Amino acid sequence: MKQISPDQLKDLIQGLQYRGYITIGPTLQNGAIVYSEILDINDLPIGITDSQKPGHYRTTQTNSNAIFNYVVGTQSIKRFLYPPIQKIFSAKFTEKKIEIQELDKPSQRYAFIGIRACELEALKIHDTIFSKSEFKNSRYTTLRHNSLFIAVNCSKAEKNCFCTSMNTGPEVKYDYDLLLTEINKNERHYFLLEVGSEKGEDIINEFDFSDADESEINEKYKVIEKTKSQIEKFLETDGVKESLLQSFESPVWDDIAKKCLACGNCTMVCPTCFCMTVEDYTDLERNSAERIQKWDSCYTLEFTYIHGGSVRVSVGSRYRQWLTHKFATWQEQFGTFGCVGCGRCITWCPVGIDVTEETTKIKKLSQLQTTSLEEL
Amino acid sequence: MQAMIPSSYRIQKFIKETQDTFTIELKSIESKNGFTFEPGQFNMIYIYGIGEIPISISGDPNKSGILTHTTRAVGIVTKEMAKLKKGDIVGIRGPFGRPWPVREAVGNDIVIVAGGIGLAPLRPVIYHVLENREYYGRIILLYGARTPQDILFRKELEKFRSRLDIDIIVTVDRAIKGWTGNVGVVTTLIPRAPFDPINTIAMICGPEIMMRYTIIELIKRGLGKDKIYVTMERNMKCGIGFCGHCQYGTEFICKDGPVFSYKEIEHLFGKREL
Ligand SMILES: Cc1cc2nc3c(=O)[nH]c(=O)nc-3n(C[C@H](O)[C@H](O)[C@H](O)COP(=O)(O)OP(=O)(O)OC[C@H]3O[C@@H](n4cnc5c(N)ncnc54)[C@H](O)[C@@H]3O)c2cc1C
Ligand code: SF4
Ligand code: FES
């Protein structure tokens, strides 16, 4: 383990840029933490901290010089590897054929700085979906393969975090190239730096960083313990899948539908949601056409449209799709939960619906084998 | 993503089947290799600048030189397709999906139950079993159409029937003058259909409600749930498990289906708004 100063972190970022990486890190934009291109360490949210509760998100400027003293921002890095809007091809119509022009292979190399344990876990889930199925999403696979991941151990937790329940955090344990732990103690501000891959090793070799001593290394575990102790939200995941699969006809769904606005925010901020739709465009003369793919959400009525009408008309049935997918059917499809416990869906739900509460309620109902909400 | 890129096919023949249903026969422009598929698989058909939709392959799986689709014009894309003519070009991606269990059915009687356009995805099964007739027991097709004018592939059905080694029973919801055949929904044909329930595989395609009642009748006749196969329909944007639209509980209809045994999806089947 190495220990580096903020100035050395600055050098590290510059080194990545020299190597041709586009450096992506947390930035403060319109009052929220957003992953975006950073040119310098000063673009990072120095002294910014956040507070998150159901339906609530605020950032505040503090006097501290800590850089990573927030939990998770609005969105994960999903948008870089799997962009919200993406051309699939352009096409020209000729007498002879439909001439398809495919996109060039993506050439950009991203270095993601500051990503959290839960976000790395979400990345692993996308790997399963996009790179390990029968068909491959080659753009995702290429971008991901060419990226560098510099993770950070969370130094605080917020009210909506439940990574400990999902077994995804807060400690970053694997799948990183480099790992930082920020220590800000006794007037001393530094980072512990660990190497997790050859790619990471290769980068570090260029620098002359000094080794961390035992007392510094101990600080890492203190940070993780402190963060863990701040996590209040809990979901007992045992039996959740079975309960949900038995609860397609539970009254809970209609009950949630009274609150849920079917806005789809939860699916848009979710680091694992992968649904997309396809749209075709032409110019007025129909000389050239384009096909675009766009993130989509199972909360929209159009999502299940087939001739004659949509399948999931009621809001309850759409909420059921989302929750059941995350905690039950995902396991059958991809072998893991579709949830990493980052809490974004709770934070960004305009009415503060809490997945852990709803899931627990459904589990209780199903175990009591009752359909009466009053009995709970 | 190669599977997301359509390739060009030219229409060799446009056949108007009924008032609202038509068949197109296609040949690849870009490749000389034929189009191989298994009965029950589907393609995503791209109508330039309009959109792309899933349509089952309705042709003979042994004739790879020609790709055949039969479509009912119902909405934006299908109505535009209905205007196509010989020489026109469409884009094709596929074949996708899990086929009908024609291999598993070897040695069994086969009951095919189709409603309306549902006959199109099952026609490759009929071709296949008739070409490999010696491997199967009795073959029975029960087909329900709205009216006598809506009967699909009528000439071909008459030709099949004249082989005498397939039972074809047709019924219509509403008769018109001159129709002397059965009237009533297709499920009414099941109790009398001549198959041996111990040794039969059933393949059903039609509206969900028709499939539901067909399953009930088949189970009454003693067919096992694992011997009854249905094909499901949901919105599809990719055909390869990426868009999420076709999810049906635990299943992706595009890659885990569209053909399922009833046993596999019994826990989902008939659940509202799934
Ligand atoms: C696996 C599979 C096989 C099919 N095979 C056949 C076939 O052999 N013959 C046939 O006539 N029809 C078949 N269908 C149904 C056919 O796909 C729809 O009738 C068609 O998509 C309607 O498109 P539209 O634009 O004309 O209708 P609109 O009502 O205008 O629909 C607008 C859009 O919604 C979507 N959509 C609408 N209905 C459906 C639907 N039923 N399934 C999926 N997406 C839909 C499409 O993206 C469509 O472009 C099949 C469907 C599936 C899922
Ligand atoms: S179906 Fe809904 S919950 Fe599942 S991945 Fe798609 S948008 Fe997310
Ligand atoms: S059609 Fe896209 S996932 Fe099945």
Image: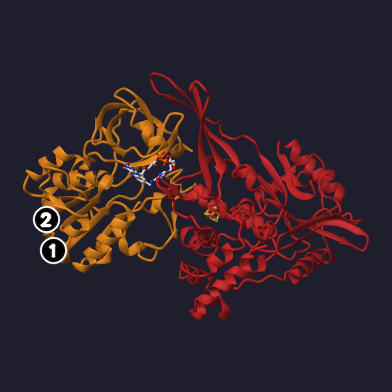
Chain colours: A red, B orange
Q: Which percent across, then down, holds residue B103?
A: 23, 53
Separation of disc 2 and disc 1 at Cα?
9 Å
The quarter of the rendered structure image containing the C terminus of chain B is bottom left
Figure quadrant of residue B65: top left
Instruction: Confirm or deny contact between disc 2 and disc 1 (CB under 8 A).
Output: yes
Q: Which percent across, then down, holds residue A92?
A: 47, 23
| Disc 2 C-beta below 8 A from ligand 1 | no
Q: Secondary structure at mark 2?
A: loop
Label 2: chain letter: B
When the figure is inspected, residue A147 is found, relative to residue A338, above or below; the finding is above
Count neighbours of disc 1 (C-alpha within 10 A) and say few if under 14, some if 14 to 19, many if 20 or more.
some
Figure quadrant of residue A103: top right
Image check: B168 left or right of B206?
Answer: left
The numbered mark, 2 or 1, whose residue comes first in the sequence reads 2
Q: Nearer the viewer, residue B35 or A232?
A: A232
Residue B196 circle label: 1
Q: Nearer the viewer, residue B49 or B176?
A: B176
Q: Residue at x 29, y 51 (%)?
A: B206
When the figure is inspected, residue A172 is found, relative to residue A134, above or below; the finding is below
For badge 2, the amino acid type reads Arg
Residue B138 circle label: 2
Q: Which percent across, then down, holds residue A216?
A: 83, 63
For badge 1, the amino acid type reads Asp
Count neighbours of disc 2 (C-alpha within 10 A) and say few if under 14, some if 14 to 19, many if 20 or more.
some
Q: Secondary structure at mark 1?
A: loop
Label 1: chain letter: B
Image check: B245 left or right of A149?
Answer: left
